[in-house]
Image (cartoon, rainbow, N blue to C red):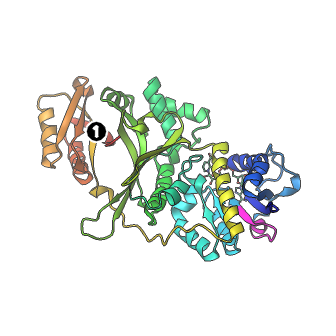
Amino acid sequence: MSTSPTPVRVALLGCGNVGSALATLVAGQHDEIQLRTGLDITITGIAVRDLSIDRGIDVAPEVFTDDISSLVIADNVDIVIELIGGIEPAKSLILAALAAGKPVITGNKALLAEHGAELYKAAEAGGVDLLFEAAVAGGIPLMRPLRESLLGEPINRVLGIINGTTNYILTQMTENGASYQDALAEAQELGYAEADPTADVEGFDAGAKAAIIATIAFGASVVADDVHHEGISTITKSDIEYAGRNGHVIKLVAVAERLAATDGGPDEIAVRVHPAMVPLSHPLAAVRDSFNAVFIEGGAVGELMLYGRGAGGEPTASAVLGDLIDAAANWRAGTHAYFGPLPVAAIRSIDDLESAYCLTLNVRDETGVLAEVATTFGNHGVSIKSMEQSGLGDEAQIIFITHVAPERDVRATLDELRNLDRVRSVGAVLRVVSGG
Ligand code: NAP
């Protein structure tokens, strides 16, 4: 028995890198999607700021509008896709669509990492979907595996390389001996890095994505402000070389962990982004160039890794299309995804976390400097596992690997070291990733 396809009319807000790739993908896959799902999906309205720009896509001019507020609540729109980015007007537009009973798909990590809880609540109140696969790790299916396949999984930790720009820069430094500045300039030339690269290289972008991952992985609301972040701009060639000599590679990692509370209360969640020494034996060490990967450690499933393109118009459009089909099927069935009550997460402060560290000190190589430095570590109970000295005179450098120690004690050690006459400066502070 065959039934007639269900027409699904879609409003697309934004037609830039991702929006234009999505419009092409939806048209190109239309027949295949209809055959396999019975959904006849058409983009019937596209809102942009500048109607005079040629978007390079095969869409009739009358589909475009610059009246975005009317499009989002129009009667002849069933589903809204938000791809304009930023907080406002994106937030108000999404709330208006949800209040009008329209499922929404977005790729807006900045918005979700700040106002996710309010938006999920609005979707629940409207009885419709709010899906956002594209907001984290671009084309890699991650949100749906976390909220469906792994919903019952006791996830302990999620480790991710979720910023392609920094992974490209660190790969150039590792494999071609490039300096940070040269690798950044090359990333900018290739379009992997913005003219102002701060959001990527200082860990803000990865921090927003990590907040969303933690929220969905652990079922409790984590916002961008809860995420401790450090960037890669202080990493030097000698840090990279030291890591290589010692069987590690330096990566900017996002870590989201669930930790048992010390007082017997609800589990605590710790989320951070920082450069780290990743053992070459760990699967994340093999993630090169601008690729992303997310490594999940579950209590039952064990270790899983999802790998792919974390950005770019087409990979990201692929994630949006997956959500669109999901939302359309739910809309046809009169149902929607539910994310749970998402209580505010109990966040464990970075000060209360423990790790092994790799610390670089630039020192004056004078008699007694090593003893003085070692005493300082001892004063704070931070135990040294190994050390390596290089250079002479004023140019000497000592790199220490510590045993696992509390962050608070390592910081106190570094503060005291900075005040020693013979310590010229403290260089990279890298956590050492365990496992793999
Ligand atoms: P983009 O290239 O800058 O495109 C933004 C589009 O939104 C443009 O077409 C712009 O119109 C339109 N727009 C912006 N403000 C508007 C307004 N107030 N009214 C109407 N139209 C407006 O951005 P993108 O790279 O496609 O990214 C879109 C979203 O996807 C962002 O949330 C981003 O974080 C997310 N995302 C992107 C990637 C990626 O690789 N690019 C990956 C993952 C997630 P005009 O062209 O007329 O100015």
- Residue 34 in the magenta stretch? The answer is no
Instruction: Name the residue rendered at 69%, 73% in the picture.
Output: 101
* Residue 83 coordinates in the image, percent (x, y): 67, 55
Asked whether 217 or 401 is in front, the reply is: 217
Q: Which residue is mark 1?
A: 358
Q: Vertically, is 427 above or below 13? A: above
Instruction: Name the residue rendered at 18%, 39% in the picture.
Output: 384
Bounds of the magenta segment: 69-80
* Residue 364 coordinates in the image, percent (x, y): 21, 30
| Residue 14 lies in quadrant | bottom right
Relative to 303, 319 lies left or right: right
| Local secondary structure at mark 1 | strand
| Residue 315 lies in quadrant | top right
- Residue 77 in the magenta stretch? The answer is yes
Instruction: Name the residue rendered at 52%, 48% in the picture.
Output: 199
Q: Is residue 319 visible?
A: yes
Report crowding for label 1: few under 14, some 14 to 19, many 20 or more residues within 10 A (C-alpha). many
Query: How many discs appear?
Result: 1
